[in-house]
């Protein structure tokens, strides 16, 4: 799964938004959202822009997860570390929310 697909899923979960509700806001089908989140389809830049508006962020913040980072430089290592920690944080939030819902 692409990191962008995972990030879009985790941002949705973080905001406690159901797939069907997000699909309605983005004017796409729920199955299309599911395919994106599973990595079966790639979102267009237009769709990423819509995600950004729904979640009150920027397109560039979301695209950070899909950015190809050149290996070897200290700056690239820092970017990869930040990206990975952000994903881990969102996954931890998802797990806590799941535990709270299913005691």
Image (tube, rainbow, N blue to C red):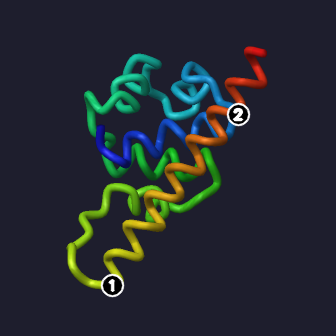
Q: Which is nearer the N-term, disc 1 or disc 2?
A: 1
Which mark is on residue 94?
A: none
The structure residue drawn at horizontal position 73% and vertical position 15%, both measured from the top left corner, is 102
Q: Is residue 28 left or right of residue 52?
A: left
Q: Is residue 49 left or right of residue 39?
A: right
Circle 2 — which element? helix
The structure residue drawn at horizontal position 43% and vertical position 20%, both measured from the top left corner, is 29
Res 92 → quadrant: top right
Circle 1 — which element? helix
Closer to the camera in the image, 2 or 28:
2
Could you classify mark 2 by the number of other residues whose Cα lies within 10 Å: few (under 14), some (14-19), or many (20 or more)? few
- Residue 1 lies, in percent from the top left, at 30, 37
Q: Which residue is mark 2?
A: 96
- Residue 51 lies, in percent from the top left, at 51, 45
Q: Which residue is mark 1?
A: 74
- Residue 77 lies, in percent from the top left, at 34, 75
Please determine whether, in this image, residue 10 is positioned above or below residue 76: above
The structure residue drawn at horizontal position 60% and vertical position 45%, both measured from the top left corner, is 54
Res 19 → quadrant: top right
């Amino acid at each position: 799964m692409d990191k962008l697909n995972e990030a879009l899923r985790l941002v949705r979960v973080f905001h406690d938004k159901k797939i069907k509700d997000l699909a309605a806001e983005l004017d796409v089908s729920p199955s299309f959202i599911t395919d994106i989140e599973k990595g079966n389809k790639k979102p267009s830049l237009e769709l990423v822009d819509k995600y950004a508006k729904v979640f009150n962020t920027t397109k560039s913040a979301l695209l950070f997860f899909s950015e190809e980072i050149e290996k070897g430089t200290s700056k690239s290592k820092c970017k990869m570390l930040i990206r990975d920690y952000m994903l881990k944080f969102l996954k931890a939030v998802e797990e806590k929310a799941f535990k709270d819902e299913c005691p």
